[in-house]
Image: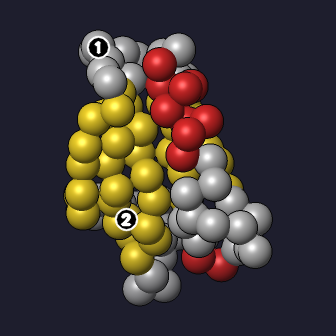
Amino acid sequence: VWKFRYDADEPLDVEIIDEYFEGEVQVQEILYNGGHDARVPAYLVKPPGAGPYPAVLYLHAGAMDKDQYLPEAIILAQMDGLPVVLFQ
């Protein structure tokens, strides 16, 4: 849990590692500042269009694979949600 505590005055410093499309849905593999000098890997799954969109945050279970929720997140983005899937 400590990795998700951060100083709200510090920028997230999002870095896009990779991006691709699943149909009209854009999938970005990103790193962001999680505080305590930790870079947190995640997927940002963007629906088509300008938004605004409701956001959904997925946290995978410790023993699960990092891609566990990605198919579900893509489906949700196709329905105009904005999923964020955290790796750690």
Q: Nearer the viewer, residue 23 or 40?
A: 23
Q: Secondary structure at mark 1?
A: loop
Picture residue at 65% right of the left edge, 78% below the top: 2
Disc ID at residue 20: none
Q: Residues within 10 Å of mark 1 (few under 14, many from 20)?
A: few
| 56 left or right, relative to 10 | right
Kind of residue sitting beneath label 1: Gly
Of the residues under marks 2 and 1, which one precedes in the sequence? 2
Picture residue at 35% right of the left edge, 66% below the top: 31
Q: Is residue 4 visible?
A: no
Q: Position of residue 56 (x, y in %)?
A: 60, 36
| Distance from the alpha carbon under mark 2 to that under mark 1 | 24 Å
Picture residue at 71% right of the left edge, 67% below the top: 64
Kind of residue sitting beneath label 2: Tyr
Q: Nearer the viewer, mark 2 or mark 1?
A: 1
Coloring basis for residues: secondary structure
Which quadrant is the N terminus positioned in?
bottom right
Q: Position of residue 22 (x, y in %)?
A: 35, 32
Q: Give the labeled residue for mark 2.
A: 32
Q: Give the labeled residue for mark 1.
A: 49
Q: Is residue 51 above or below residue 38?
A: above
| 68 left or right, relative to 73 | right
